[in-house]
Image (cartoon, rainbow, N blue to C red):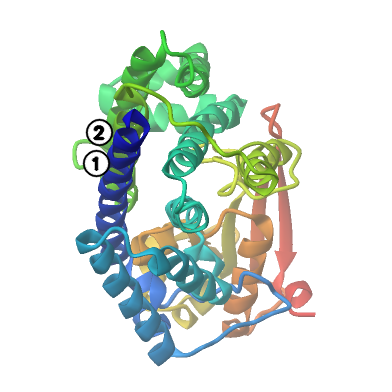
Amino acid sequence: MLKNIMEEIYKDRIRKITRIVSVCLIIQLLITYKLWVMAWRTVPAVPLFSFLPVNPGNTIDFFLLTLLFIFCFILVLLPSSRKLFLLIPLLFFVLILEDSSRLQPWVYLYSLMFLYLFFQSQNNANVLFAWKIILSSVYIWSGIQKLNPHFASEMFPWLGDFTGAGKYFERHHWFAYTVASLESLAGIGLWIPKLRKFCCLIIFGLHLFILISLGPLGHNWNHVVWPWNIAFAWLVFDLFFRNDLVEVKLSLKKMYVASLIFIAGIIPALNLFGKTDHFLSAGYYSSVASMAVFYFPQTEKDKLPLTTNPHLYFDQHAKLGILMMDNWAIEELNVPVYPEDRTHIDLAKKICPCMEDQQGSGIRLLVKKRYSSEKTEIEIPCSVLLK
């Protein structure tokens, strides 16, 4: 009897969370609408797999985006529509094949949540357990990813500018390391009953910090992460802050356990050795990913799209123009370029044909070592990129 009651409570909780995630997806798709249809943007698409270029065309792009909106609206009204939990991730996958910049962390994490809901729909406890694992692993690994000198000296002082203590943070790196450690430890503490609510409060504070830093009171930047932060704060409240009267027995099958270990453990761990992608490993705002710019002769400035103008800088001595590639993407698409060297290089390959001087234009990558302040600049001209 009690088990049946708890099953109903869990089912109601899953429906509520599904509605929250669906609403946030709708908002984030609206914020990033240019990202999903090539006709609405000037930033070139970079296929997920360079050996498999996918170009379905603007009509198909628009149709798939429309389906995403419709399916999310249906889930808001009918959050138990099981087929949609598979169809939404599949639609995202098709769109991501065309452009890897669509593989944003929120797309990846929401898709994982829907997939576990689809494959474990007969066991509400398994669904909630999987969601808890995914959620807590985000904080654990995100904190670990930030334990590097680049986060301490570059990213954290920038994030903390709104406090007026940005310069202080630049000189005193211990503060950044403390915040990163707190995030990781709070993710672990979510599983310790006596510490759970305290750790939830720490996580709420971190989300508030990010919202203020990136919101209108701060840098007013990367707007798409605002609803994502609110959604994850709510998920922490609903999945961890609230206490359950009793735990429903889990049915841990081998594939279920193996998938959770792979997603929440192996993929993020391998990123510490450069073997997996940052966005799939909770490497958000860790400042470890390489920085990329496209350089070109000043005389060829007019060959670039007009949308690049606010993100161009000029070296009068070298007579070179510099395009900040990530700034261009964020301004136009409301998302950064997928933060991997191969993606930036492939994006540069799309820009190179615009340039007449193939030797005098190309990409510069500022590659960072994770555990030291050392940075290496790599320059690849278009003449090499287009071979």
- Helix, strand or loop under label 1: loop
- Residue on which the image places disc 1: 215
Q: Badge 1 local density, few (<14 within 10 Å), some, or many (20+)?
A: some
The C terminus lies in which quarter of the figure? bottom right
Q: Which of the pair 140/117 is nearer the observer?
A: 117
Amino acid of disc 2: Ile
Q: Residue at x 47, y 78 (%)?
A: 304
Q: How many marks?
A: 2
- Residue on which the image places disc 2: 212
The N terminus lies in which quarter of the figure? top left
Q: Residue at x 20, y 62 (%)?
A: 77
Does residue 214 appear anywhere in the picture?
no
- Helix, strand or loop under label 2: helix
In this rendering, position of residue 209 left or right of residue 87: left
Q: Residue at x 41, y 8 (%)?
A: 194
Percent of width and height locating residue 153: 52, 26
Percent of width and height locating residue 27: 25, 59
Percent of width and height locating residue 364: 65, 57
Does residue 71 appear anywhere in the picture?
yes
Q: Which of the pair 296/315 is nearer the observer?
A: 296
Q: Are marks 2 and 1 in contact (CB under 8 Å)?
A: yes
